[in-house]
Amino acid sequence: MRRCAPDFSTRFCRRRATAATAAGLNVTEAAHVSELIARIRDDGTTVILVEHHMDVVMRVCDEITVLNYGRRLAHGTPAQIQEDPGVIEAYLGRSGENESAQA
């Protein structure tokens, strides 16, 4: 564990970062990883998660920051992110684009 400066509470120093934790995992394995990350978070450790599996992100995170081409596109709760028009457009495209691409 990282040592904290004497003037900081230890709860501010308990951080862990993880990147692409669920990459290459099947649905069952991703669920197990989600449970593990949630337990670590619930024990008081701040977890910084960089992940592309949206089921893992939505299950584990209290707050989400979405990047698009390296710029912050949105920040909020999982529910706010799922409804954000900018996120939907950036990652799913506009509805007219999807329909013409399928034709």
Image (cartoon, helix red, strand yellow):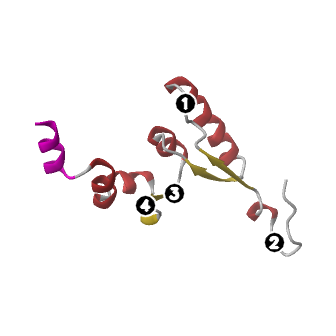
Residue drawn at point x = 32 percent, y = 55 percent: 90
Q: Looking at the image, is mark 4 or mark 3 nearer the viewer?
A: 4
Task: Tell me which amino acid carries mark 4.
Answer: Tyr
| Magenta part, dominant SS | helix
Task: Tell me which amino acid carries mark 2.
Answer: Phe
> How busy is the neighbourhood of tag 1: few (under 14 within 10 Å), some, or many (20 plus)?
few
| Mark closer to the chain start, 1 or 2 | 2
Task: Tell me which amino acid carries mark 3.
Answer: Glu
Q: What label sits on residue 8 in the rendered view?
A: 2
Mark 1 near mark 4, Cβ–Cβ under 8 Å?
no
Question: Label 2's element?
Answer: loop
> How busy is the neighbourhood of tag 3: few (under 14 within 10 Å), some, or many (20 plus)?
some
| Mark closer to the chain start, 1 or 4 | 1
Residue 20 falls in image quadrant:
top right
Q: Position of residue 13 (x, y in %)?
A: 77, 62
Mark 3 near mark 2, Cβ–Cβ under 8 Å?
no
The Cα atoms of the two marked residues, 1 and 3, are separated by 24 Å
Using the image, determine if residue 99 lies above or below residue 12.
Answer: above
Q: Position of residue 72 (x, y in %)?
A: 45, 66
Give the residue pinned by disc 3.
63
Task: Tell me which amino acid carries mark 1.
Answer: Gly
Using the image, determine if residue 2 lies above or below residue 43.
Answer: below
Q: Nearer the viewer, residue 95 or 79?
A: 95
| Mark closer to the chain start, 4 or 3 | 3
Q: What label sits on residue 69 in the rendered view?
A: 4
